[in-house]
Image: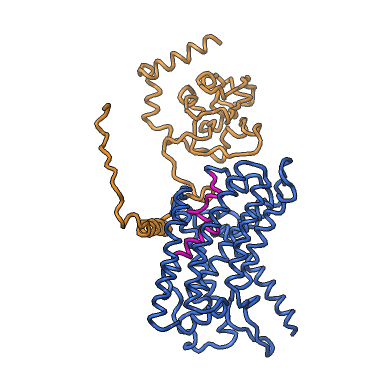
Chain colours: A blue, B orange
Amino acid sequence: MDPLLIKAIIVLIVFAITLLVATYSTWGERKVAAFLQDRVGPDRAGPAGLFQPLADAVKMFMKEEIIPSVSNKWLFVLGPCISMLTALMTGVVIPWGGELTIAGQTFDLQIVDLNIGILYLFGVVSLGVYGIMIGGWASNNKYSLLGAIRASSQMISYEIAMGLAIVALVMTTGTLSLKEIVQQQDAGFANIVYQPLGFIIFLICAFAETNRAPFDLPECETELIGGYHTEYSSMKLGFFLFAEYINMFVSSMVIVSFYFGGYNFPFQHEIGLEGNILTFVQTGFFFLKVSFFVFFFWWVRWTLPRFRYDQLMNLGWKVLLPLALVNIFVTGLIMYFTGNL
Amino acid sequence: MLTNRSKQVVKREMTWFERAYFPAILHGLSITIKHFFMKKATVKYPEVKREFAPVYRGQHVLKRDEAGAERCTACGLCAVACPAEAITMTAAERKKGEENLYREEKYASVYEINMLRCIFCGLCEEACPKEAIFLTDRIVPSTFERDSFVYGKDKLVEPIDQRVDVSKRQTPAVLEFKKDKHHKHNLTFMDKVLGKAKKH
């Protein structure tokens, strides 16, 4: 088969799965939220409320679309588009499993194996802030603007600590390709063993980057009504909310690939599985790990209260940034003395 | 100090362990995950119904007597007693041949309760001298139209083949209480009702 066709199919599948997971994240989040609060959550639409996301989507589409007359209309529409686009673009470099053999040809379960995968990921994540910023600014609403300012300063602050946490990881692995990082963890231990502090910093920053509780200041309902998406309605609002769920899913995949061995699972070569079956089991394990982290996102949301703004900045600049630097330094020292340079 | 419940507050510096924040987060996570597996408080309403108290006051019923004739004589005491003015009725005279339908010579041809006005206090039931109106443990269902909350006789009178059980609200103690016109509470209440009725 034409390799280009295969790539197109993989792209489509990854796209579809990402969207599907994001859709059902809304259901999952509501269910988990309910369970953590001793409730049962949505259970009316379909068995266990499984059709709830469909009902929500229909609701979103049917709602009246309002574009404020004082807004900058072009940018107002552009905001959610950028958010959605950047959210979907991040999934490109994630390896979903090993190799798949179809009709004698082998294919990687990954859209592209960029040799600068981490840099690409980081660049796209940085672009994500523009969607929020443009959307909030174009609304011509004080609350939206405040939310957008908060979002941009928060994301920029935490990107630094996040980047430095990854620098230590890049030092130990010696590569910027996600595929290679995952493959290295097949041979040795998962990276969490070498980079526990880096993992914690990365995890905290991932929460801040996705604007999830306790870092959900840009959209805090109690103070800013809805933050940057105050003026949005209908599917444009849906896009913003959807982008957040996609971001959450992608962050979980990145965390798993970086620190928890990606699609690898213990003793995978000893149990006698081979070829495509092994690949499918690997993908299953990958999703298992990812679902745990998605669950963790929800779990934390319903545990911790929101940070105050000064606490947020203190944590970012005075705690995480120095810790990340110390992490790099200690990693360097250990590598120097163990001769792994 | 108005009460002696006030406490001296000591503001002390947090220890390093507390400032590290992480142990506290883990503790919080352990609390929430415990709740994840706890029994849920939700009652799935239309399928499962929470048990009501025996004295619950829900949708009204107009009772029939043992032979199936309506007990209500349209005396209007319930309407007068109603603090929300939710009850209206029109009286009519019983014709020949309707003895099996109405117990006494006078009956209510129209009897309406506005369920949106009603506060379910049960004073109508207390005022009724004919044991005709009772509040039951049924809930007034919600609808989309305001008009549909004005319940007429079609919804209020109990069907002959589906009698509504009001024995919980008609205990011997209650009947005894209603007989005792000299009971202090009953007396003042009935006086008030009769006084109002005379004015009309």
Q: Which residue is drawn at 41% across and 38% down?
A: B54
Q: Give the range drawn in magenta.
A: A201-221
- Can you say whether A69 is above or below A199 in the image? above
Q: Left or right: B140 with respect to B97? A: left
Taking the view exactly as shown, the residue that stands out farthest to the top is B199
Q: Is residue A38 visible?
A: no
Assess whether residue B52 is covered by the magenta stretch: no
Q: Left or right: B112 with respect to B166? A: right
- Can you say whether B47 is above or below A8 in the image? above
Question: As rendered, which of B128 and A175 lies closer to the eye?
Answer: A175
Question: As rendered, which of B86 and B124 lies closer to the eye?
Answer: B86
- Can you say whether A15 is above or below B196 in the image? below
Assess whether residue A203 is covered by the magenta stretch: yes
Q: Left or right: B81 with respect to B5? A: right
Locate the C terminus of chain B by quadrant: top right
Q: Is residue B187 visible?
A: yes
